[in-house]
Amino acid sequence: MKINTTIQKNLVIIICYAYILLFIYAAVSKFIDFPNFKVQLGQSPLLGVYAEFIVWSIPLSEIIIAVALSFKSCRRIALWAAFTLMVMFTAYIYIILNFSSFIPCSCGGVLEKMSWNQHLIFNIVFVLIALMAIFIESKKQQEPKKTILLVTLLTLVAVTAVIVLFQLSEKKIHHNNAFTRRIPHSPVKMLKGISLEYNSFYLAGYNKGKIYLGNNSAPKYIMEIDTSFTIQNAYRLNQDNHNFNFATAQVRVKDDFYYFADGTIPVIYRGSTQDWKGKPIYKGNTKFSTYEVIDSTNFTVRALHPKTGENYLTLIDIQNKNVAQKHTDILKKQIDGVFDTDGLLSYNAKLRTTLYTYYYRNQYLLATPTLDSIVTGKTIDTLQQVDLKFAYLNNWREKKFATQPEKINTYATTDGNYLYIKSKRLGKYDSPEMLKEASIIDVYQVNNNSYQFSFYFYNYKGEEIKSFKVYDDILLGLTKNHLVIGRFRKERFNPLQ
């Protein structure tokens, strides 16, 4: 009996030393690499919203418990605390593996080299040895029933606390984010890139495995490239009745048709991608600065109001006697109605939704094709008010930026259920160094107007993407001198769902 008691006593001491070693090592590792630990915690799908508090409380709790385990007088309470904390860690990993939308980076320290499943097994082992020490200690007090009750209660409290944190964090991260990004392991696999002869190309469209590039310097020429980058063709648009002096015409390719329009001259051409011959389908009075194709006879455009000079969105309906249906109050003016409402127009064919993403504020608009119903969405950025300063020339007749403003949303595109926005603004836990290596793309779900996650689109040969498009599971990007293609890893994010 004496030998058994001695063995049990030594076993408790060994377990305490194991926890002391684990907690001290883990806490010191976190403090040594504190900035990285803070970033990893801030990007956690479960704890990111509370990272400011948790980033200090976890390592401090580990140190306090480790110190308490060193003293015989408070060892019993410290074992209970160690058990509860390890149950919380275990519940956290279980939720990450089974209920989280993505799996974040590792926790650092002693667990950094382990997979998440290995983390789970490791934690379960430590939960069990803590239980063993607790029950050995409880025999001295002759309180087995009380110990079982307390173990059950603390387990329920620990697991419930983690579940509540998860639910609250999910709600806050999607709808009241305070600029906290969640960044999973790269959901995009970069496939390849191809060098372009000119830096004036833009993405005109994608259809049946073929990428179409327009050229701002040569508006009537278009390049066709397959997704393997092995076949390239160049075409010249053959426009019937082309008596218009276009200055900045752009091409849009949708299905088997192309569209050609300038906007400063209110004319739209349409032609087949089989022979690239087009003819005017719209000759009206509404001048516009950008346009998007809804279908073969309907176009959303951003125009300038003839009286106020302010931006507004309108629908051009070819079948309705070439009349543009005006909706002048969609773009919300904050300063001048021109620069402050500048942004990116896009159309989502799957959801039949027109989207407009402001450059200089944390907002985007969702509208029906007829522009009758408007919903305002918010990005995770916190800048709501446009901050622009102007200089006036030629006796106040010409207005320019006094200082170049920072764009909140530098580029945006949509496909399927998602809106993708490129941002150069750093969130709470973003690393400034990443902006030298990659572009940050924030992903929003259009049908419920919520933030989902962010990912890095890495630079290609030192060049960041200036524009990009998503077509099904393919991501196309244009850098200064290259066209690059990536594909979403469906096991990490499936844009088709």
Image (cartoon, helix red, strand yellow):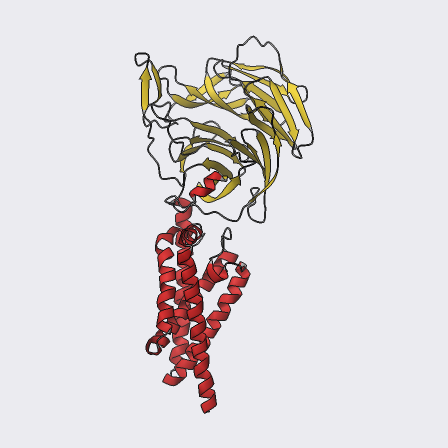
Q: How many marks?
A: 0
Q: Residue furthest front?
A: 32
Q: Position of residue 497 (x, y in %)?
A: 56, 44
Can I make out residue 447 in this image?
Answer: no
Q: Residue furthest right?
A: 231
Q: Quarter of the image holding residue 152? A: bottom left
Q: Residue furthest left?
A: 395
Q: Is residue 238 left or right of residue 132?
A: right
Residue occupying the point 51% across, 20% down = 317
Residue occupying the point 37% across, 17% down = 309
Q: Position of residue 28 (x, y in %)?
A: 41, 61
Q: Residue furthest top?
A: 243
Pick whichever, 250 or 232, lies toward us. 232
Pick whichever, 164 or 411, lies toward us. 411
Q: Position of residue 331 (x, y in %)?
A: 38, 27
Tell me if residue 164 comes above or below residue 397 in the rendering: below
Can I make out residue 381 in this image?
Answer: yes
Q: Is residue 91 left or right of residue 252?
A: left
Q: Position of residue 182 (x, y in %)?
A: 45, 47
Q: Quarter of the image holding residue 310? A: top left
Pick whichever, 30 or 200, lies toward us. 30
Tell me if residue 6 comes above or below residue 444 in the rendering: below
